[in-house]
Image: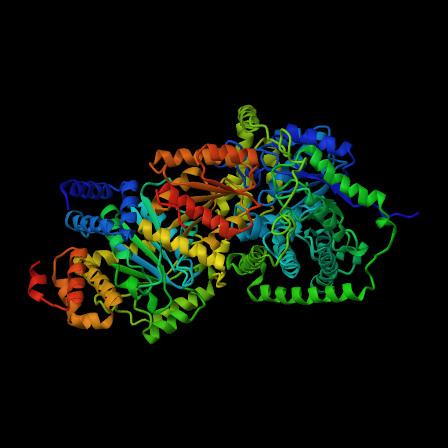
Amino acid sequence: MSTSAAIQVSDLAAAIAKGERAALAEALNLLDDRRQAARQKSAALLAHLQSEYSDNCNHLIGITGPPGVGKSTLSAALIAVWRKRGLRVGILAVDPSSPFSGGALLGDRVRMQTNSEDDGVFVRSLSSRGQFGGLSAEVWPMCIVMLAGFDIVLIETVGVGQREVDVSRLCDTTCYVAQPGSGDSVQFLKAGILEVPHILVVNKKDMGAVAQRTLSELGNALNAEHPDGQWQVPVLATSALNGSGIEALADVMAHHHQSLQERKQLARRRGSYQAYWIHKRLEEEFGSFGIDKLGGEKALLEQLQSQDMDLFKQYDSLRQQCCNGEVDKHESDND
Amino acid sequence: MQRDRPWLMRTYSGHSSAKASNELYRTNLSRGQTGLSVAFDLPTQTGYDSDHPLARGEVGKVGVPINHIGDMEALFDQIPLGEMNTSMTINATAPWLLALYVAVAERQGADPGQLQGTTQNDVLKEYLSRGTYIFPPEPSVRLTTDLIAYTVKNIPKWNPTNICSYHLQEAGATPTQELAYALSTATAILDAVQASGQIPADRFQQVVGRISFFVNAGIRFVEETCKLRAFSRMWDDVARNRYGVEDPKQRRFRYGVQVNSLGLTESQPENNVQRIVLEMLAVTLSKNARARAIQLPAWNEALGLPRPWDQQWALRMQQVLALETDLLEYGDLLDGSPVVEAKVLELIAGAQQEMDNVAAHGGMVACIDNGYVKRELVQSHTRRMRNIESGDLKIVGVNCYQETATSPLTGGEESGIMKVDELAEREQIATLQAFRATRQQGAVDDALALLRAAANDGSNIMPSSIQCARAGVTTGEWSEVLRGVFGEYRAPTGIDFVASDRSESKALEQVRERVRATSDELGRPLRLLIGKPGLDGHSNGAEQIAVKGRDSGFEIVYEGIRLTPSQIARAAQEEGVHLIGLSVLSGSHLELVEDIHNELEAIGCKGIPLVIGGIIPQDDARQLLDRGLKAVFTPKDVDMNIIMNTMVTIIRQVNGLEPLA
């Protein structure tokens, strides 16, 4: 990359870190851009952000759950609480794309109703773009950008079973929102279809007895210790409509984040998101054959997590290996 | 010869200011109009004073601005309310406008107990169609029932609510759906009045007797007549069997009508005259299901605001039918017709089934929040739009017989529509600020405290509202107190429900190909922001465009209604869109587009192209294009594939891409 391009990238990164809206928007557009020049610039930007602006102090949160459960309204209520606490919030709102046209209707923004005069909130809607389980390929790179500029980054996505696996592997804290009166979440949990979230929420507690019953059913169905270890999964009731339970939810989220930091797990987790993202992309491109060629999923993820390299460098070098059929571990280790 | 008395003849009107509207009303009354139908502007309907930022461009556009008792007094200057029959199209703020009406009647020396007229007061359909709701469904229903309970006790000749199927049809309802949802709304409201305990059981029959309806009549006038016969029978059944009303008079299906505006065309607008006349037949032909009050749209509504002459023409249509023809000399013409009877029974059966569906989804109020009814309506509407596009549904002058000679009606200086005085908004704001300066703040604060207390403790909202009216409280202040107590609400939008267009039509495939090719060249998927600036809540058009955009392969960020220019500009930036599509039907397009341009420039997004759809007069369209807007779509643009293609072309142009073959 030429010197002037490098300056551009570092200026852009600095502006993002300051939370400048125009810079954030430009960076997100850039990450979306598949053209060669844009991809190179993206790679440089992400590398720069990861080396200069990632202190792992901020919090990456995923909110998922079935459609119509009130995730967006809940997110809006949480945003209000965080803003009151002086935290800056970036949101990636993911909606499914149409399998027929590839187009998408992204309606979370209208449901979220944030105060758009507020410079401390930034919402980008994304389409799942028909791939990658629940999340499109752009989500992790966009998270890297958002994490550089905000105290809290929230990914909101529809999930009704295995679909939310993606989000749980890309977030520090995953929060599953269940519908009162619907036994689905309980069944999914019991059957192991639902990845155990860090926090379970029954929204619409204004529904009274129905919500109460779902609350206790979920409590019973849960093996209260999270598979990560050292975390008791809380089950909370909220009502986005009248705002009750939202402060408590924000507290529990902060508590989980703190516990990750105290146990020094945050950096390790973040590394695993990147490994997971690269693995997914390679699998998508080359299939399980390609993954096998790289030594299989387990070895690949371990290798990726042990490296301290930027996203696109790792990805590109592995891609090259798949294409060339040559697996030269030494070279990639030392790169 | 014995002739039936004609129905009440009204014209839905109001514009610019209370003074200008008052002059219009007095002219209309002198020309033989027998009642008044007040159109309020959108800030008044959604509870904002004329100087609120969201009111910019909307003041005096679709109706008269009423901020306080002074405005209301000017509106009815020299019109004695004790003798008038006034219909007010007002919903979320209905208790407030009725309070002002009562307070003005008191000042005129009339007995409020003798007032006659109607408040539309049907908020449920606002969530589904018209969009002028403010509060969540539950407190809204409470305000509705408070007004009903108050008038039944204190203004017994008032029609406290006009359950509207009119707007449901505009939102896409089939006749069956219109019947089912209107009747389900009526029972939801009556049940709520009953549950409120404000009316003793032995007087409840009176409440049922005061419920009236506001229906629509479309161009399929045979079916529409049958719909009204079905309405009468079903309402009679509901009143008798659900509420035990014994007096047949109290079970009568009383309704007013505005014939269909949705079907009025911008192309060859003179054809609307025959459409309106045929639609009027639908609601008058059958004596046993005849309208009590009729208001007709003007022939040029799809072009812009009608002039006094256009409204006079609409009134004359009614007069010719009532006074010249022999219609009113006969009994019911359709009784005994097996064809009509079969159709009526079919409609009743279908409507009954749909009412059961609503009940199964928790009743009409629950169906607002869970989106059931909106989904059904949007599906019907989408079907209609797709049928027009394919030509299966014929509209003369629009998708067939488009050739036309030049119309002498739309030529001339004013292009056949009314121009609202551009100074009206500024004058209204000046009057408002002067009014605020002269009132007694102590009395205002006391009245607002009473209102807040009533809102909180559940006592009837009317007495404190009337106190507010007398004290000089403004529309914005009244609403702000209730917003504080009840909160604000956004109803589910139509975009959440529409299934993808799976038809593999050639035109659609072509659009998709162009979207794909342009996405590839620009490196990322084409993204559009669709939203409605200002206070106009008619979101069907915007939603249809959003759905079509998705079906064409765009990523659509749907931003909804009631947006400030700054919200739109900032959303466009955050979302990284390639184009912004606006929808405005209230006539505030010039001001709003100018503001959005300025906001975009201020945040460095001047390059994002803007297009607009709505009721935009030709002169205004030219002005907008001169000022840099890229395209103007109006009701005559029925082929949405062309709209999509135009947007792709604009995106290509502003990004410096070569035209596609």
Residue drawn at point x = 70 percent, y = 39 percent: B11
Q: Quadrant of residue A331?
A: bottom left
Q: Position of residue B648 (x, y in %)?
A: 42, 48
Nearer to me, B59 or B649: B649
Residue B235 visible to the viewer: yes
Nearer to me, A269 or B248: A269
Q: Position of residue B68 (x, y in %)?
A: 59, 32
Q: Position of residue B108 (x, y in %)?
A: 71, 30
**Relative horizontal placement of residue B560, taking residue B40 as reference (left or right):** left
- Above or below, B418 against A275 in this view is above
Q: Residue furthest front?
A: B661
Residue B113 visible to the viewer: no
**Relative horizontal placement of residue A8, taking residue B498 as reference (left or right):** left
Nearer to me, B441 or A291: A291
Residue drawn at point x = 49 percent, y = 56 percent: B507
Q: Quadrant of residue B118?
A: top right
Q: Position of residue A248 (x, y in %)?
A: 33, 55
Question: Tell me, what colour scheme is on the image?
Answer: rainbow
Q: Residue furthest right?
A: B1
Residue drawn at point x = 15 percent, y = 70 percent: A299
Tag count: 0
